[in-house]
Amino acid sequence: MGERKVVNKYYPPDFDPLKLKKPKMPPDKQVKTRMMLPFTCKCSVCGTYLHIGTKFNMRKETVTDETYLGIEIIRFFFKCTRCTTEITMKTDPKNHDYTCESNASRQYDERRDLDAAENALNDMKLQEDQDPMKFLEARTYESRREMDIQDALGNILELNKVQGNVNFSEVMQKVLSKRSFAEIKRIEKEKTEIPHEEISRNFVRRIDEDEADQLLKKRLKPIEKTNDTKRSLFRNTPKFIIKKVGIK
């Protein structure tokens, strides 16, 4: 068994790389690759939808009989996930896209919509050439559309003129002057209005002598009454004399 992790290789002293032959690959050789499906397609055999972004083990080959401006076209082979039918698709360098070649149909193709729009325009032109009334209707529609566009442009130009005449520096000065006037008024109001804390701190209540005397009398009256009642009760109570009796 040979070495699994080859680090060094032996080259004999008589080795001549010019004598080596370049291996030739056949042009129709298929190479295995893993690739995502670039579009959503429907299998024509079983009707299964193969969605965009699905990974497949594909085989690719270069188309020998078809090119576009010298650019090679590559064909891919892959199988349906349900019925294993082989589906083929090709690169489309002209439209920068891919095309379904066999056994499947693409679900959405942008080129089909473009072709349908071009066909509709061509049909309208033919009808206008053949029918003079159609031609007249198309002309009136175009003239009305041009008038609407001109009106819209006129409105835009008028708005630009109005905005161009406005002096933004004057507007900013007015705004700043209004703000400064409001600030001055606010400061004056704050100066005139003294805070409540300063008022309570500096305020001292002063009482006259008459008021002080009246307050003292009110407070002393109940005390005097209570003393008189106590004295009267003490006077009216009977007195008891306790004698010491000796025990013989």
Image (cartoon, grey):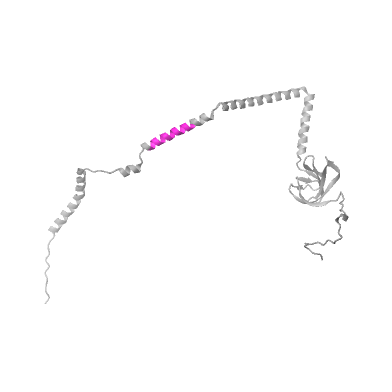
What percent of the width, then of the height, locates residue 144?
68, 24
- Vertical order, 198 against 15 (above or below): above
The mark tally for this picture is 0
- Res. 139 visible in picture: yes
What percent of the width, then of the height, locates residue 235?
12, 58
Give the extent of the magenta segment. 175-190
What percent of the width, then of the height, locates residue 120?
77, 31
Who is closer to the viewer here, 235 or 58? 58
Residue most extreme to the front: 13
Q: Is residue 101 magenta?
A: no
**Secondary structure mainly formed by the magenta segment:** helix
At 17% across and 54% down in the image, what residue appears? Answer: 227
Figure quadrant of the C terminus: bottom left
Q: Is residue 186 magenta?
A: yes
- Res. 102 visible in picture: no
At 61% across and 26% down in the image, what residue appears? Answer: 157
- Classify residue 158 by image quadrant: top right
Left or right of 10 on screen, residue 181: left
Who is closer to the viewer here, 38 or 161? 161
What percent of the width, then of the height, locates residue 70?
83, 41
- Vertical order, 149 against 64 (above or below): above
